[in-house]
Amino acid sequence: MCDLSSVSSGPGVVLASPGAQAFAERLAGKLGAVLCGVEQHRFPDGESGVRVLGDVRGRDCIVVAQLRDPDPQLPGLFFLADALHELGAASVGLVAPYLPYMRQDTRFREGEAVTSRSLAAWVSARFDWLATVDPHLHRIPSLDRIYSIANAVVPSAPAIALWVQGHVHRPFIVGPARLVKPHLPVQALSLARRIARALRL
C-alpha cells in the first residue's frame, strides 16, 4: 500500500466502466478532473467493443469500475486500459471499490486456480495503480504481495460510521462471533469493531 499522490501529476481524466457512471461523475467533481465518455457495445456473437470518446494524450487517466459482478465487466475493462495506453495516456489508474476474486487466495482443493493472483497479474499488466475499499485480505496480508503496481486501500469504517450517525438513532453494531464459527475471516469482525470505535460505542 502506498500514497498514490506520487503517481499522478494532475487532476487528469476520469472514465467510467459500465455501472460506474454516477460514481465517476462524483469523483471527477471532487478532483476537478475532466469526465471523458466511453462507448461500449456488444457484437451479436457476444464480444465487447470499447471506444474512448475524447483525447487522452499526455493525460493521467482514472478508470472507475464497479466489479461486484466481475465476469461480464473484466474484458471491457482490460480493453479500455489497453486503448488508453495505446492512445497516449500518461498513466492509467483503476478505482474499484470492490476488488473481486480476493477470496480465492489459496488452492483449497487440488487443481483449483488461485484466482486472486491471476486477477492481480492481469490488472498489474494494464494499470499503473489501483485504489480499492477494504479488500478481502485473509491469507494475503497486503495487496503488495500479489499486485506489482502502486495501490491504496481506503477504509470503509469512517464513511459507514458517518452515515450511521446521521440516520440511525442509538445504533447497535453486530459482527460475526468467532467463538461460534472460528473459521470465519477476521475481516468482518474487524470492520464491525472499527465502526463501533468510530461511533464511540
Image (cartoon, rainbow, N blue to C red):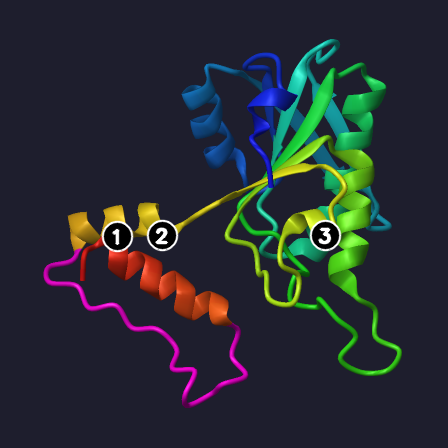
- The residue closer to the viewer here, 145 or 48, is 145
Is residue 20 one of those drawn in magenta? no
**Amino acid beneath label 3:** Arg
The quadrant of the rendering that contains the C terminus is bottom left
Which residue is labeled 2 in the image? Answer: 157
Label 1 or label 2, whichever comes before in sequence order: 2
Residue 141 on image: x %, y %: 62, 58
Return the residue found at the far left: 169
Q: In the rendered image of this protein, does residue 111 appear above or below residue 152?
A: below
How crowded pointer 3 is (Cα within 10 Å; few <14, some 14-19, many 20+) is rated as few
Counting the numbered discs, the total is 3
**Amino acid on which the number 2 mark rests in the picture:** Ala
Give the amino acid at mark 1.
Ala
Q: In which quarter of the image is the N terminus?
A: top right
> Which residue, given by chain and number where applicable, does mark 3 sit on?
145
Contact flag, marks 1 and 2 (Cβ < 8 Å) = yes
From this view, report whether residue 111 is shown above or below residue 154. Answer: below
**The magenta stretch spans which residues?**
168-185
* Residue at 83% in and 38% down: 125
Q: Is residue 30 left or right of residue 132?
A: left
Report the Cα–Cα distance between label 1 and label 2. Answer: 7 Å
Q: Residue at horizontal 66%, vertical 30%?
A: 93
